[in-house]
Every structure is written in C-alpha cells, then in structure tokens.
Image: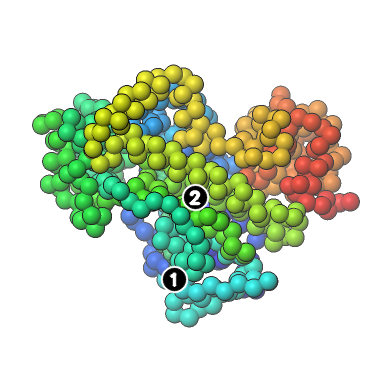
Amino acid sequence: MDTDVIIVGAGPTGMMLANELRVAGVAAVLADKLPRRSELSRAGGVQSRTQEAFDQRGLLEPLLATGTYPAGTAHFAGITLPLTHDRHRQPWRSIPQVNIEAFFERHLAAYGIHVRRDHELTGLTQDDDGVTATFGGGARIRARYVVGADGAHSTVRSLLRADFPGRSASATLVAADVRLRGTDKVDTHTWAEDGHWAALFPLGTDTQGRPMHRLALGGPQHSLPRETPVTEDEVRTGIRTVFGPHRVELLELCYGRRITNSARQAADYRHGRVFLSGDAAHIHLPVGAQGMNTGIQDALNLGWKLGAAIHGWAPDGLLDTYHAERHPIGAAVLRNVQTQGLLMDLDGSRSPDIVATKELFTALAQLPEVQFHLDDMLSGMGFRYALPGAEHQPLVGLPAPDVDLGSARSHELLRSGHGLLLDPSGEFSEVAALWSDRVNHAGKAAATEPMLIRPDGYVCWAGDPTVLESALHHWFGKPAQR
Ligand SMILES: Cc1cc2nc3c(=O)[nH]c(=O)nc-3n(C[C@H](O)[C@H](O)[C@H](O)COP(=O)(O)OP(=O)(O)OC[C@H]3O[C@@H](n4cnc5c(N)ncnc54)[C@H](O)[C@@H]3O)c2cc1C
C-alpha cells in the first residue's frame, strides 16, 4: 500500500475528510485534477451544525478570524424564520466557500498534507485487499480505501457505474455575486406579479471592504439554457423587474452563472472499498445552504470509521453505517430542497396551485413549532441518526450538547478524535478505562446526564447504565485493555 486512503477531490468534502483522517492518525493522499484551488464563487451559507463540527476540531475560531462573516436568519423557500434566530450556539453564518477551502488548504499544509494537484483520476480497480487508482499522466497509487469527493460530475461514481437516480433539471436560475445599492429598501425575497423573483443574501465584504451580495434571479426571463452567459444587462433588467425602477442599483456584477434544479442521489454510498461523499453522492438546487454542509457532514461521519477500520478496531459493520446513516439525511435534504423549489415557483409559472400552497405554507410558517421544525433541518442540528437505543432515549442519534466541564467544554475534548464518555458521578470510570485508547472519560463532570459521544460528536448512548458496555463494544470494538 502507498497510503491508507486516497481522497479524490479537494473541495470542502475532501478537505474535511483529509483533516478527519489526520485527526484519526491515518495516512491519506488528497488528489485533485485542478492545477490550483478553484476561485469559483459557490456556497455562502454555513449551518450551525457545520460550525459545531469545525469547533469540535478546533477549527472554528481560526476560520472566523480570517474575515468578517455576518450571522443571518434561516429561511425556507424565502419565508424567513425569525423565531429561530439565536436558537443554536453557532448562528447561521455567511462564509464564502472559497475562504473555507483556502483555510483548510493552509491548515492541512501546516500538518504536511498537501493537495496533489494536476492529479485527475482516470481509473480504479479494487480487490480484496485494496484499491488501485490511476491518474492522468500514468501515476498509480494503491490504498486500502478510496473516497470519491469529486463533485457533481464524479469520475469515481462513473468508474463504479454507480446508480445515480433522480430528476433532470426543469428550471434554471441566475446566481450572481454582486455589489448593489439600495438593498435596505427591499425584502430579501421578493416576487413580482409576472412571476419573476429575486433573493438576496449577504456575502460579507470584498477585498476593499465593500458589501457583497449573492443574488438569485428566477422567472421566465432567466430560465435559459445553462451555458447562456449571465450579462450585466440581464441582471440589471431582472432587478428592475422585481424591485421596481430606481430602488436597487447594480454597481458591479462580479460573477454570474446559471444553476439548475436537477436532483439526484447515489443509490449506494459504499461500493466495497470505495465510498462516495459530498456532491459525488448527492446533487440538488443550492437553496437553504445545504450542499457543502451536507458534504462536510458526510466527511465527518466517514472519517473516524475509516480510521477505526485502518487501526483494526472497527466493530463488524461499522463502515456500512456510513451509508445507513448518511443516505437518509441526503434524501431528506433532497426532499426539503424539492419542496422549497416548488414553493419558490422557480420558473415563475404563477400556477394557482403553487400560489395557494405558498399562501398556506407562509401562514403555517408563522407557528413556532413549524419554524423550529424547519430550522432543525436547515441548521443541520435536528438531523438524527437511527442509532440503537434512539427509540427510547431522546438524545441518542443527535449532535451532543456542548457541556461546560469546568476546565474545558465537552466539544473541546473531541478535538483528539476520540470518543467521549461524560460521566458526572464517576460511576463508569472502571469500564471507561478499558477503552481509554479510543474514548476520553470526563468523570465527575459538570451537571449533565451521562452520555457516550462518538468521535463525530453524535450521542450513541445515554441513560441505561446496563447497556453502556455493549454500546462501547458496538461503536468502539473490543477493548484493548482486557
Ligand atoms: C451558486 C451556488 C451556491 C451555493 N451555495 C451553497 C450554500 O450556501 N451552502 C452550501 O452548503 N452549499 C452551497 N452550494 C453547493 C456547494 O457549492 C457544493 O455542494 C460543494 O461544493 C460540494 O463540495 P464537494 O467537495 O463535495 O465537491 P466540489 O466542491 O465540487 O469539489 C470536487 C473536487 O473534485 C475535483 N475533481 C473532479 N473530478 C476529479 C477527478 N477525476 N480527479 C481528481 N479530482 C477531481 C474537482 O476539481 C473539485 O476540486 C452552492 C453551489 C452553487 C453552485
């Protein structure tokens, strides 16, 4: 073997995974076909759960220190959810994807992990022991596992001939990075009578400190073939059509592209020793800031499991739980995006059915329970894995709370990449000692109920002391000490 894991694709998913594998103490090669990091403007919204994941690796503070990143309020199909403001420790934030990727690249380099650029994967063969990856130019690398984090048009997925069922695009929209004047005079989501609409999201400031916005424009005028260039004229006319004359002025169109509502998901995230993650596993319209976030969470879920397999302590079936846990989340994201696309009336049909549905939905979305339910999805905080015990214990399967333990926060104790047993009474110290090479023990911790937290920050046991040992076996394998 040349390395333990080959990660194909150094986007946010691949870089997060490279860091997870580093934390788990296994070797990885991170390869990308591009000669340098992409400067294409894409994601802007970073969910609460993603920021928590960064915090659990000590990355959030340094990432936030790289710029000014405004906190915002979640919306569902343009319906703002004001009651969800400040609901989580980390608010929804606008952090450009390019900044996240630049940050990760520097962070990984500081640990000697450099992206192998100009490495386009062209071939993949696997056998019982490993996988051989071939790259353009003839380089061959052999590893125990390969992860395809190579985006929407994934070569890994094609080479596997993996099923990628779903729906082709039925609408195109404009997504543009712009400088505007007059945004304070208009709603962030505005629909015109003729079916055109616009959505505005703050993108922080440009290099000269001037405010930037991501502008989405939809409706008949904008539903053009994907390759059609986005011009200043189109954006200016679109703004005038939706907001009315002389209200919002386009100062600069920095970047514009067309995006579609095609939606697909890989039927299997695991193919033997090869895994699919991020956009390689799921694609959808980027509404509600979910694509990059879902990919980063895929990486968080898979990283420690690959680490366990490579170190030899993975319990039977652990690697299969990646598909079992992440596929339903990907499917749920696709469903909520589909609903949002319908309510947003993407191509401006003004169909009476859509207008009526949106009216009812907007009324329902004033109810606190509805806002919280939607926010659970859009923040990533409410996604729950169907783990053993989840049916009896409300915490199991959810992201662990960040508990103040006096000398540290519990999320800080996850930075080692180990699991964590919170044991306020100290009654489990003997059993915890058996797994001390994989699970940190916070005995006599501050007020919290006892819980076992996986390295990815999800609660995998709470409550019933009689099943703690079997939970440790289930997630962390045979104890080294016995
Ligand atoms: C306009 C727009 C706005 C968006 N807004 C948001 C948002 O606010 N929030 C959000 O969460 N998401 C958003 N998204 C989605 C987000 O950009 C993607 O989900 C995210 O980039 C997926 O990350 P990834 O690492 O899985 O794939 P990618 O970022 O696509 O990275 C894949 C990498 O693989 C490399 N690669 C491809 N093929 C090969 C090969 N054969 N060999 C080697 N390398 C290869 C590519 O060069 C690339 O670097 C938005 C997308 C768009 C277009």
Q: Residues within 10 Å of mark 1 (few under 14, many from 20)?
A: many
Q: Is mark 1 within 8 Å of ligand 1?
A: yes
Judge from the rendering whether residue 70 lies leftward or rightward of residue 228; answer left or right. Answer: right
Tell me the SS state at disc 1.
loop
Identify the residue at image location x=49%, y=69%: 159
How far across and down, in percent of the image, does residue 15 sit?
50, 56
Identify the residue at image location x=23%, y=38%: 348
Q: Which corner quadrant of the image does residue 178 belong to?
A: top left
Residue 53, placed above or below residue 402: below
Q: Which residue, given by chain and number where applicable, does mark 2 sit on?
A: 295
**Residue 210 visible within the image:** no
Q: Which residue, given by chain and number where applicable, does mark 1 sit on?
A: 120
Please state which amino acid type lies under the numbered disc 2.
Gly
Q: Which corner quadrant of the image does residue 147 belong to?
A: bottom right
Mark 1 to mark 2 CA distance (whole Å): 20 Å
**Residue 52 visible within the image:** yes
So how many labels did they put on this image? Answer: 2
How far across and down, in percent of the image, does residue 284 sit?
40, 48
Judge from the rendering whether residue 87 lies leftward or rightward of residue 366; answer left or right. Answer: right
How far across and down, in percent of the image, does residue 101 sit?
43, 53
- Residue placed furthest toward the right: 482
Judge from the rendering whether residue 450 lies leftward or rightward of residue 87; answer left or right. Answer: right
Identify the residue at image location x=46%, y=35%: 378
Tell me the SS state at disc 2.
helix
The N terminus: image quadrant: bottom right
How far across and down, in percent of the image, does residue 119 sit?
45, 71
Identify the residue at image location x=84%, y=46%: 434
The foreground one among 224 and 119 is: 224
Q: Is mark 2 within 8 Å of ligand 1?
A: yes
